Image: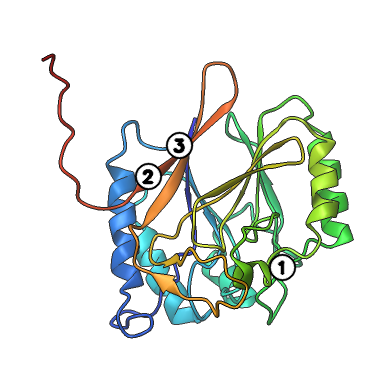
Amino acid sequence: MLLVQLSDLHVIAPGRQLSGFVDTGRLFANAVSAILGLQPRPDAVLITGDLVDAGGADEYAHLRTLLAPLPMPVYVLPGNHDEVGAFRDAFADHGYLPASGPLHWVVDTHPVRLIGLDSTIAGEGGGCLDEHCLAWLDQTLGTEPKRCTIVALHHPPFASGIVHMDRIGLSNSVAFEAVIRRHPQVERVLSGHVHRSIQRRFGGTIALSCPSTAHQIEFNLHDTHRGGFIMETPGFQAHTLTADGSLASHVIPVGTFSGPHRFHSN
């Protein structure tokens, strides 16, 4: 199985640019083209939040148009920039999404089990997984204790060191980590939000954050830094199930690059 993870698309209405110069729609279209060029084609695509920037219906309509070329299943999670009602309406045809309540879900139709958690808090930048979510997660993981599993959410369950982003991180990561630790079949905990590729040990497994398909958060660890973004190379992640039943995770930059070139002996 090959799973592509996208995050933090921040798609806006057609004809507009984020902050006056970031064409998030065009950048996301470039990512879609890169996915279609992968060999082999991915079995599924997972998007870990902030699909649009302001939560408007026009943004979600534009996003659906941009997603249309992808022939494989696409699984979505909300981020703090998404509006849950408009999000649910935009993806009403996605049968794995619950019709009401938090947007937690599980997909069992692939060799790797996929579990999505809604970590958003309405009107806030930070996130939380409440006790009902954690109980649901614990029970859901307990039904398939030997099956390779990915758990995904928008907010990273770890501190990144980028202080202004950590202030709007996941507030109850310790309780979440305790649940993950009880279930060693969890091969990855995937997230977005911080617009950078970051890896950390977490709950006996590996937790990753995914770069944005648009702009990246500036790497600055000073606690007085007000925060900003930088136009580094966009990217996404690809998680592949290897022959030994574990996952290998790759960061794929999006752009035009020379090659591939054949190796030649001197």
| Disc assigned to residue 127 | 1
Q: Which residue is mark 2?
A: 252
Image coordinates of residue 34 in percent, x first then y, are 29, 48
Is 43 drawn above or below residue 121 in the view shown?
above
Mark 3 vs mark 1: in front: 1
Is residue 71 something that shows in the picture?
no
Q: Nearer the viewer, residue 158 or 178?
A: 158
Q: Earlier in the sequence, mark 1 or mark 2?
A: 1
Q: Which residue is mark 3?
A: 43
Distance, label 3 to label 2, CA atoms, is 16 Å
Image coordinates of residue 211 in percent, x first then y, are 46, 56
Mark 3 vs mark 2: in front: 2
User: The disc labelled 1 sits on which kind of residue?
Assistant: Gly
**Residue at the spot x=72%, y=63% of the render?**
170
Q: Nearer the viewer, residue 156 or 24?
A: 156
User: The disc labelled 3 sits on which kind of residue?
Assistant: Asp
User: The disc labelled 2 sits on which kind of residue?
Assistant: Ile
Distance, label 3 to label 1, CA atoms, is 29 Å
Q: Residues within 10 Å of mark 1 (few under 14, many from 20)?
A: many
Q: Secondary structure at mark 3?
A: loop
Q: Secondary structure at mark 2?
A: strand
